[in-house]
């Protein structure tokens, strides 16, 4: 790493910590990217196959070497199989996370936990009634048990469909039925993808891609949506609140605890434990002013949305947070937790605590959390952090910036409440052209792109064009750190959006949650489409994942497009080795699901693409462009 | 004057073929992998991985490319003078405008390093001789040859042969003296 640190990130906290990492000789994700480059060209194009040991095989994209794998699969089949497995992995991650929430709900229903309770009984009843669970004469526990059992059935194919399928507009369901991509069960579609991509099963690239769409829809309207809704029921439905973001949320004289990963199950218990008077006293006895809890990535978003817990940073900030020297413990659950954190923590007094039996890290401290011990275990980890604080070396502490304010908590319920109870004012604003359209800017960070640059600038450009921006996951943190998540950012919006934001007292970029909460966005799209009597693909909406890196993002992008939402990616997925699959993604899907992907890493050009799509859709609805 | 060249250490090659794919990319019109694979006339690699069998019966890869001989048998066999020494100093470079696709150079090459393909620089002809040009365009920009940049294991190095040999001679000397009891 020898460029100016400003080349790596637009964030001053990141730049300062990269410099400190250099001085202290600590390796980061950017160093490892350089070591890996150039990456494998076959893999970049999706042309390598490791599915059996007649291979591994590669297809020569320049035509002079082999054009078929040992089994006979050509470039199209290999690319489609590889893409299918990426979607399956992404859908599995979201959905297994969702299942953990359903298990928690079930444990509450069966009275097997005192640690977890129903925080939003109104939503419990509302969702139960919506999915056809008979709530008559039942108490909350009984409803919770029945609803959990209903959702368990979604994971196999006991119901033959998904509980939330009625949230999908009729016209969209007809499209799915026509092409045979209606999801039948969450796990079933993932397992079937693994089956189809075994040697000698599905050897038609188009058929494989259609099943990829079906897998992803099982994620969006199944696994992810269940994760979101059950999280709200158990931990509370988010409402707007102001908090703070960036590494400045760490406090020099406090015991600093970070929660990282994706699930609220562990982090909510940690959040409770840090308020325990006995533990606060222990922290004071250790010489600290108190205990400071902050979040990283989506677990951070879960706590930020519901509790206003401050946010330390997104994916590429996780190593850098440790480099402040001020973090006692990072408590992790699962997904997007770089294995390198253990090595970085070992350079300081910091500890990495793993909490799930499905996500252990060699060298970390494992404290297994379950529904019957979570509160006790959370206290144990906080005590561990207080012990670690005693070993902190103050000479190595550098908290480089002051925190920035951000507003969070825009669940669909909160958005509708802000609009006065129905979506009609939003529809009116769209019809009037004050809000020309809506774009969901979501996804990750990727060290191949300057950290936060593409996401932030794209969001900024969209609001200028009167396009309301919804953000989740790492993208929410990218925009929040630059001030776009505060109502004052309406000043940077176009005149129409500015007027609407000022009238409602909301920011022009709304934080709607973690990455499973992209389900909130498709749910909202479904509500709007139903209200207008159109398909989702007719709406002036779009999606973007400017700095994506993960398989989960592939699944999200796929379900966005399969829902009829045009999606701009900052980096191409590994499909370019197949002309057929690439052609489908960029053009062909328009005639199938009414939307396509585009690839554009320039934030202004990406906003332009979204704008063009919104113009086209507005014209088709007889609205001003 | 000696020129830097690509030094091949086949004992380190794992047969990943990254050199070949990055070679083709470097010789494409657009120079980016994502676009190079969509060009109407595809670029071709100029380094190839041969496969041999060692005495234990194990298949072993062998990276093979032009050695830029001087005098070069290919150049001597080329009737139209398409293999030129005046395009890049120290390199034998095929001029697609002069090549007639006769195959003489390939037959003369002791390393089997020349192949014939439809060439994007001579799209009107079906075949043109294609061989390593030492990435002279990249070298002008201060870059090393694409195959060397791509090599993960050190099987390809870019340097002076004598320096490489000197290092090897040092290793040999160490080995010889370390055996003395």
Image: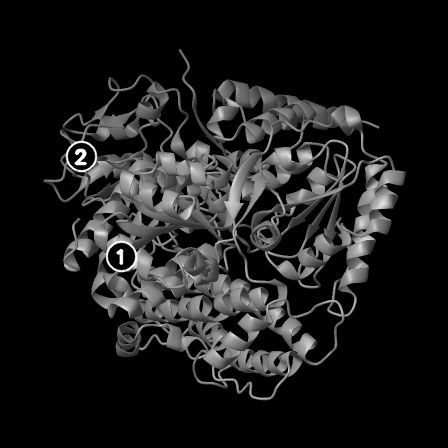
The answer to which quarter of the image holds residue A205 is bottom left
Q: Chain of mark 2?
A: B
Density class for disc 1 (Cα within 10 Å; few <14, some 14-19, many ≥20) is: few
- Tally of numbered discs: 2
Work out which residue is located at the far left of the displayed protein and give it: B124
Q: Nearer the viewer, residue A93 or A328?
A: A328
Tags 2 and 1 both on a single chain = no
Per the image, the residue denoted by label 1 is A428
Q: Is residue A433 above or below residue A286?
A: below
Density class for disc 2 (Cα within 10 Å; few <14, some 14-19, many ≥20) is: some
Q: Nearer the viewer, residue B154 or A590?
A: A590
The answer to which quarter of the image holds residue B125 is top left
Per the image, the residue denoted by label 2 is B121
Which residue is at a point 29% across and 58% down the rendered structure image?
A427
Which residue is at a point 70% across and 81% down the rendered structure image?
A110
Q: Chain of mark 1?
A: A
Q: Is residue A319 above or below residue A528?
A: above
Q: Give residue A139's position: percent from left, percent from top.
A: 64, 82
Q: Give residue A50's position: percent from left, percent from top.
A: 48, 60
Q: Is residue B112 above or below residue A103?
A: above
Q: Secondary structure at mark 1?
A: helix
Q: Quadrant of the N terminus of chain A?
A: top right
Q: Secondary structure at mark 2?
A: loop
Residue A507 in view here: yes
Q: Is residue A491 left or right of residue A393?
A: left
Q: Give residue A179's position: percent from left, percent from top.
A: 28, 75
């Amino acid at each position: 790493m020898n460029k100016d640190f400003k080349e790596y990130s637009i964030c001053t906290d990141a730049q300062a910590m990269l410099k400190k990492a250099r001085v202290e000789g600590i390796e980061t994700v950017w160093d490892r990217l350089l070591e890996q480059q150039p990456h494998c060209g076959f893999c970049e194009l999706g042309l390598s196959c490791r599915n059996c040991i007649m291979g591994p095989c590669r297809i020569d994209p320049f035509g002079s070497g082999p054009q078929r794998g040992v089994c006979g699969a050509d470039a199209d089949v290999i690319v489609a199989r590889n893409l299918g497995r990426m979607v399956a992995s992404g859908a599995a991650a979201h959905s297994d996370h969702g299942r953990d929430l359903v298990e928690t709900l079930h444990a509450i229903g069966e009275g097997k936990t005192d640690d977890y309770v129903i925080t939003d009984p109104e939503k419990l009843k509302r969702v139960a009634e919506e999915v056809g669970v008979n709530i008559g004469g039942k108490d909350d526990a009984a409803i919770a048990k029945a609803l959990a059992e209903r959702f368990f059935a979604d994971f196999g194919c006991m119901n033959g469909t998904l509980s939330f399928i009625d949230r999908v507009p009729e016209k969209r369901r007809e499209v799915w039925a026509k092409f045979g991509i209606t999801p039948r069960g969450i796990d079933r579609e993932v397992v079937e993808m693994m089956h189809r991509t075994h040697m000698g099963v599905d050897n038609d690239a188009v058929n494989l891609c259609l099943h990829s769409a079906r897998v992803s829809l099982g994620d969006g309207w199944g696994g992810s949506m269940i994760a979101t809704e059950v999280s709200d029921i158990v931990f509370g439905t988010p409402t707007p609140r102001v908090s703070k973001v960036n590494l400045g949320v760490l406090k020099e004289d406090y015991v600093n605890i970070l929660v990282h990963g994706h699930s609220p199950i562990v982090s909510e218990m940690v959040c409770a434990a840090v308020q325990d008077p006995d533990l606060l006293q222990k922290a004071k006895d250790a010489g600290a002013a108190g205990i400071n809890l902050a979040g990283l990535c989506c677990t951070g978003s879960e706590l930020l949305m519901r509790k206003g817990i401050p946010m330390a940073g997104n994916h590429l900030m996780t190593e850098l947070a440790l480099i402040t020297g001020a973090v006692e413990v990072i408590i992790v659950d699962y997904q997007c937790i770089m294995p390198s954190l253990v090595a970085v923590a070992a350079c300081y007094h910091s500890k990495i605590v793993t909490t799930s039996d499905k996500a252990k890290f060699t060298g970390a401290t494992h404290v297994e959390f379950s529904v019957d011990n979570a509160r006790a275990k959370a206290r144990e980890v906080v005590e561990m952090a207080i012990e670690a604080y005693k070993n902190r070396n103050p000479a190595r502490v550098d908290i480089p910036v002051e925190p920035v304010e951000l507003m969070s908590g825009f669940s669909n319920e909160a958005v509708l409440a802000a609009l006065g109870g129905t979506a009609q004012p939003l529809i009116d604003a769209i019809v009037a052209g004050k809000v020309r359209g809506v774009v969901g800017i979501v996804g990750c960070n990727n060290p191949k792109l300057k950290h936060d640059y593409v996401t932030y600038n794209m969001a900024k450009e969209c609001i200028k064009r009167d396009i309301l921006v919804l953000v989740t996951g790492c993208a929410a943190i990218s925009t929040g750190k630059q001030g776009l998540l505060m109502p004052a950012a309406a000043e940077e919006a176009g005149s129409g959006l500015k007027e609407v934001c000022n009238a409602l007292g909301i920011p022009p970029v709304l934080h709607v949650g973690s990455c499973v909460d992209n389900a909130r966005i498709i749910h909202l799209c479904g509500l709007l489409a139903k209200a207008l009597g159109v398909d989702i693909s007719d709406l002036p909406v779009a999606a973007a994942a400017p700095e994506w890196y993960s398989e989960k993002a592939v699944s999200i992008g796929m379900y966005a497009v399969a829902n009829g939402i045009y999606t701009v990616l900052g980096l191409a997925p590994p499909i370019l080795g197949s002309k057929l699959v690439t052609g489908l993604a960029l053009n062909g899907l328009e005639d199938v699901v009414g939307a396509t992907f585009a690839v554009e890493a320039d934030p202004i050009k990406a906003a332009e693409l979204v704008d063009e799509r919104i113009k086209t859709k507005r014209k088709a609805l007889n609205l001003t462009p | 004057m000696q020129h830097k060249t690509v030094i091949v250490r086949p004992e380190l090659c794992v047969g990943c073929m990254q050199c070949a794919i990055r070679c083709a990319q470097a010789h494409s019109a657009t120079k980016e992998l994502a676009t190079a694979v969509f060009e109407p006339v595809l670029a071709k690699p100029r380094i190839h991985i041969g496969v041999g069998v060692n005495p234990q019966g194990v298949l072993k890869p062998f990276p093979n490319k032009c050695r830029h001989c001087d005098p070069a048998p290919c150049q001597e066999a080329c009737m139209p003078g398409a293999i030129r020494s005046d395009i890049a100093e120290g390199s034998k470079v095929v001029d697609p405008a002069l090549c007639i696709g006769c195959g003489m150079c390939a037959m003369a090459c002791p390393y089997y390093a020349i192949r014939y393909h439809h060439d994007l620089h001579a799209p009107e002809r079906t075949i043109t001789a294609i061989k390593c040009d030492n990435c002279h365009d990249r070298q002008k920009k201060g870059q090393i040859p694409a195959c060397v940049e791509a090599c993960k294991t050190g099987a390809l190095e870019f340097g002076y042969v004598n320096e490489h040999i000197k290092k090897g001679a040092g290793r040999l000397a160490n080995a010889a003296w370390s055996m003395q009891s």
